[in-house]
Image (cartoon, rainbow, N blue to C red):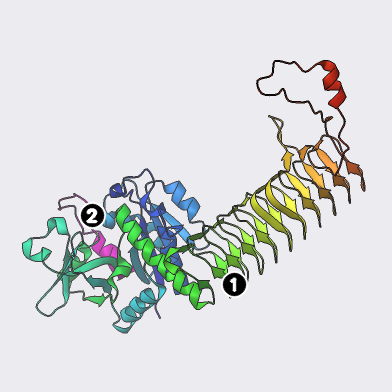
């Protein structure tokens, strides 16, 4: 087998996207579109992968920092032929075959590229094109064949005549060309076209002049080579990639109760026997264990769940970790650096931020835990708040193992609650509590008689004093 290199064209801005972001960096199904092209190439084990960058070059380079990828700068951008010429220096010592494709075709599959290489090998090809048949070929270059059905040239639509525009076989923009032939032909390509650019497609006509045969492989699924040039095409490609992902998940043993409403990014990992309810979004590099339940309306971003975890309706997790057998929600919010232990319970309308909650601990409802360390077997009562921010700095709250915190408690950080302590309901805790103690902070309860409706009689100080009493503290 001959040596192979790849050139990915990714220098264009993509004006039809109407965006300040370079086209190949627009996300499709949760990832920049060019990432899918790189992923399709990597199993092919090419000796070199060169990405031609231009607009927002530094940003594209940063996003594609992977081993084996090199970058060539096209500046200014004067067409596809000019882009391939920009990669010449990086291929000057390469004597094999060069695969050329665009960075805006995220639907391309590894299997298709390998089939393309096999055909090129079998025919000992010098130039091989990947073509497709479209019912509506508008916008694509047309494949022009001679009387022997050999490819003789490619007519760009803006330069094609009426007959050529009626041709339905189109150029996908994917080529395999011997490196020496490629750059020899490109050196003869001019700018005599409507755009005054150097078209890569012109190497086909130049090859015909030199009697170099040009082979074509008709792509069975034309959609794989669809380039993205607009927001509507972006959405169409995303729909295809989401559907591929859903099928892969179900094939791996994951249950999707309503597949069309579930959106799972490509790098998410989900264990078998997990059940995902409708209207769920799982993004980034999230990991979900086996036998989990993810209920409706849940949003997960870069979060990790153990086995048998339940995330109940309407909850949001962002860079959180939840260990085995724990339940979260409904309507809970785990913010970055929240870590919940095993067999724990984070209930409805509970928010956890940059905090650790130990095994078997519970915060069942209406609670905020921020910058906190909560031990094992702790009960956090309803309405508890860790007051972690003083207007300038964040401060920690530490609650040791086996503490019981009553309802409506405020911990004014920094504060530490010793192991086995009890905090009375309604308390505001401003100082550390030693282990095994009861802490209560309450004002004296006072009761006054109400003035009867329509009465002008004033309640005297003596009457007030008679009904005033202190409430006995109860935890």
Graded by Cα atoms within 10 Å as few (under 14), some (14 to 19) or many (20 or more), the crowding at tag 2 reads many
Q: Which of 264 and 461 lies nearest the eye of the viewer?
A: 461
Residue 47: horizontal and vertical position, in percent?
A: 46, 69
| Residue 353 visible at all | no
Identified at 58% across, 71% down, the residue is 274
For residue 124, which quarter of the picture?
bottom left
For residue 291, which quarter of the picture?
bottom right
For residue 402, which quarter of the picture?
bottom right
Q: Which mark is residue 271?
A: 1
Q: Is residue 472 above or below residue 463?
A: below
Q: Which of 40 and 359 lies nearest the eye of the viewer?
A: 359
Residue 273: horizontal and vertical position, in percent?
A: 58, 75
Identified at 27% across, 74% down, the residue is 128
Q: Which of 381 and 258 lies nearest the eye of the viewer?
A: 381
Residue sitting at the far left: 162
Secondary element under disc 1, as helix, strand or loop, is loop
Residue 401 painted magenta:
no
State which region is magenta.
175-199
Q: Quadrant of the C terminus?
A: top right
Residue 105: horizontal and vertical position, in percent?
A: 35, 63
Query: Which is closer to the viewer, label 1 or label 2?
Result: 1
Is 279 on the left or on the right of 429, as rendered? Answer: left
Residue 195 painted magenta:
yes
Q: Which mark is residue 459?
A: none
Secondary element under disc 2, as helix, strand or loop, is loop
| Residue 464 visible at all | yes
Identified at 66% across, 58% down, the residue is 321
Is 177 on the left or on the right of 6, as rendered? Answer: left
Residue 312: horizontal and vertical position, in percent?
A: 60, 60
> How many numbered circles are shown?
2
Residue highlighted by disc 2 = 198
Q: Is residue 307 above or below residue 139?
A: below
């Amino acid at each position: 087998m001959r040596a192979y290199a790849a050139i990915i064209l990714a220098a264009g801005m993509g004006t039809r996207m109407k965006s300040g972001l370079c086209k190949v960096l627009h996300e499709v199904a949760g990832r920049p579109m060019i990432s899918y092209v790189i992923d399709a190439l990597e199993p092919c084990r090419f000796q070199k992968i060169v990405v031609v960058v231009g607009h927002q070059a530094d940003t594209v380079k940063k996003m594609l920092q992977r081993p084996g990828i090199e970058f060539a700068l096209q500046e200014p951008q004067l067409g596809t032929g000019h882009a391939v010429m920009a990669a010449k220096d990086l291929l000057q010592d390469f004597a094999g075959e060069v695969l050329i494709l665009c960075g805006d075709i995220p639907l391309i599959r590894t299997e298709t590229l390998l089939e393309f290489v096999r055909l090129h090998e079998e025919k000992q090809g010098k130039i091989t094109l990947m073509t497709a048949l479209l019912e509506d070929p508008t916008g694509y270059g047309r494949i022009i064949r001679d009387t022997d059905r050999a490819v003789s040239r490619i007519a760009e639509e803006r330069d094609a005549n009426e007959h050529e525009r009626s041709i339905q076989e189109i150029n996908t923009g994917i080529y395999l060309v011997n490196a020496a032939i490629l750059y020899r032909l490109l050196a003869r390509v001019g700018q005599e076209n409507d755009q005054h650019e150097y078209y890569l497609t012109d190497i086909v006509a130049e090859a015909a002049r030199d009697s170099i045969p040009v082979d074509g492989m008709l792509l069975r699924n034309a959609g794989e080579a669809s380039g993205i040039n607009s927001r509507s095409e972006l959405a169409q490609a995303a729909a295809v990639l989401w559907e591929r992902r859903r099928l892969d998940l179900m094939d791996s043993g994951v249950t999707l109760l309503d597949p069309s409403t579930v959106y799972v990014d490509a790098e998410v990992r989900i264990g078998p026997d997990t059940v995902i309810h409708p209207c769920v979004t799982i993004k980034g590099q999230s990991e979900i264990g086996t036998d989990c339940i993810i209920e409706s309306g849940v949003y997960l971003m870069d979060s990790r769940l153990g086995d048998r975890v339940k995330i109940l309706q309407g909850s949001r997790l962002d860079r959180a970790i939840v260990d085995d057998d724990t339940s979260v929600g409904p309507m809970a919010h785990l913010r970055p650096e929240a870590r919940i232990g095993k067999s724990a319970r984070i209930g409805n309308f509970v928010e956890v931020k940059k905090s650790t909650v130990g095994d078997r601990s519970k915060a069942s409802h209406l609670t905020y835990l921020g910058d906190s360390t909560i031990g094992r077997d702790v009960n956090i009562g309803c309405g508890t708040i860790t007051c972690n921010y003083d207007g300038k700095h964040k401060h920690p709250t530490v609650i040791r193992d086996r503490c019981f915190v009553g309802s409506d408690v405020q911990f004014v950080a920094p504060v530490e609650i010793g192991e086995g302590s009890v905090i009375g309901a309604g308390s505001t805790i401003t100082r550390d509590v030693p282990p095994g103690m009861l802490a209560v902070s309450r004002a004296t309860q006072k009761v006054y008689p109400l003035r009867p409706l329509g009465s002008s009689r004033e309640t005297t100080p003596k009457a007030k004093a008679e009904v005033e009493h202190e409430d006995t503290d109860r935890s």
